[in-house]
Amino acid sequence: MRLGLRLALAASCLLALAAVGGGQEPPARGRIATVPATAELRWPSAAALSRYDGIDGARMKRHVDELVAISRKSRAAGDRQWGRVAGTPSGHEAERWLAGKFREIGLDVRTDQFELRNQALPRSWDVAVSGGGKRLTLASASPIITFPTYMPSAQGDLNLDTVWVGLGMESDFVGKDVRGKAVFVYSVPTPSSLIQSASWMGAVRRAQDKGAAALFIVVAIPGNLSFVSHIQGLSSDRKLPVFTVGLDDGEAVEALNAQAAPVSLQTRVQWRVETPTGLTAANVIGVLPGTSDESIVMISHLDGYFDGANDNAAGVASMLGVAEHFAKRSKDQRRRTMIFVGIPDHHTGDAGGRRLHDTHQDVFARTAVIVNAEHVALAEPVWDRRWGSNDRPSLIRTNTLGASWWGVHGSDRLARIVSDGFAAFGVPTQVEPGGSSGELRAVQWDAPSFYLHNKGVYYHSSADTPEVVPAEGLRTATQAFAKIFDDVNRLDLAELRATPPASARAR
């Protein structure tokens, strides 16, 4: 079949001629399943899983390395907040890279370009603390991911008296006037900077309510990592610059504070944020035709901060592994057309996810399942000291994969298929489903759906490097996805869907 005709057929499958517009929500097609994962991982006989032996973890690890190389070009170009960022040269290069990989596999490929909303991007910043004749430059300091929401202005230069409030509990503020000052809070990650004690113990809200002029959150992960961190509990009504700080830098500030007492430290914080206009990005879509007009859809976001190896080069690599596996089968062995989508802007607004939702309702009406592959393979470290020593704890590498969030929006039969697929290949998950659906959020109710989503210690940090993404973890996650799709293809659409709760039906 000529390429032009193949692409036309693929486009007819992908494009919704009667798109859902104006932000309308389609009827809910499912519910959140409550079937738990297996409490103990189990492995069937090798013969039962032999058809997945050709899935190559080492090949997928090379995909991770190639995406990381794109991120490092951003750093070499001088981008202060570097990585694969939608609308920037690194984001566009990642889109072209994925389109090329899809073509190599033999998929019909198109890119669906769209305009991004105006994005406020931190371009430069500097944090230095002085006192007792010493000056500390905090190299690890980094604006939080929602920095533009809370900053008092797009450009700032403040020189502030400084207060250390420990964990930031109510008693830690007793006798301390923080109004108009820089406040340093020590925060315990649980297990990463996504969920940390400064948020769930209320420290950030207390500091803000008591009038802090700037907030610095010392993330207690060994080393001196930088983070692009989420912080919950802040109010956008009271503006202040908010940064995270690595543990080594934070402890140096605490030591200097103790030495200089009772004289207050001074913190100088400078920042500059720009809001470029007219940026574009594209969903990258690859289609592997099946024998029916029904489909399976797999999505994974391309963007990531720093190297972004697990977040989300690992998810993209797994998606490519699934595509390669099924492309080796003849078309008559694929009950459903498979659609693979790389979404470019998960971290900066998710216009790609919303566009997929708005333009593919005709496809989703005949979709058996949508899956989000996000942060799928992370080696879980332990916090320990070297054997036989009294050293400070550090992150010690292990050969154990970190357990992921998972969840299913669909029937209990679908949930059991997903749970059994992960267990079959030893993919560790929390027993109870839950956590964030991540990039799936815009389309999770458009058809039965599920996700695998790890948020371990290295989340959004400068330590999210290829070294923490094991090839074996990529292999087993991808094998699980492939088995789940095979099992899904044994069921009709009605068996995969669940009746939505009355509250959803009434929307």
Image: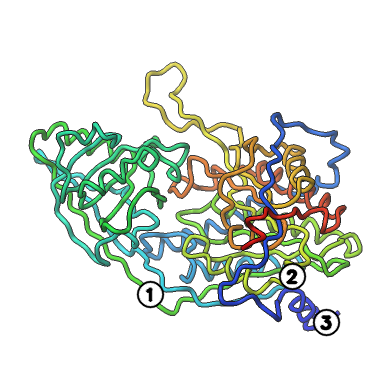
Q: Which labelled disc corresponds to residue 2?
A: 3
Q: Residues within 10 Å of mark 1 (few under 14, many from 20)?
A: few
Contact (CB < 8 A) between labels 2 and 1?
no
Q: Which labelled disc corresponds to residue 363?
A: 2
| CA distance separating discs 2 and 1 | 34 Å
Compared to residue 327, the image places residue 230 above or below, namely: above
Q: Quadrant of the N terminus?
A: bottom right
Which residue is at a point 67% across and 55% down the rendered structure image? 502
Instruction: Tell me residue 444's x, y (percent).
Output: 64, 58
Q: In which quarter of the image is the C terminus?
A: bottom right
Q: Answer with mark 3 or mark 1, whichever residue precedes in sequence.
A: 3
| CA distance separating discs 2 and 3 | 24 Å
Which residue is at a point 85% across and 33% down the rendered structure image? 45
Name the residue tied to disc 1. 276
Say left or right for 237 vs 22: left
Q: Quadrant of residue 173?
A: top left
| CA distance separating discs 3 and 1 | 41 Å
Three-letter residue code for mark 1: Pro
Say left or right for 82 vs 498: left
Is residue 187 or residue 376 the one in the foreground? 187
Q: How crowded is mark 2: few (under 14 residues within 10 Å), some or many (20 or more)?
A: many
Q: Classify mark 1: helix, strand or loop.
A: loop
Instruction: Tell me residue 305's x, y (percent).
Output: 46, 56
Which residue is at a point 52% across and 65% down the rendered structure image? 350
Three-letter residue code for mark 3: Arg
Is residue 127 or residue 438 the one in the foreground? 438
Q: Classify mark 2: helix, strand or loop.
A: helix
Say left or right for 268 vs 460: left
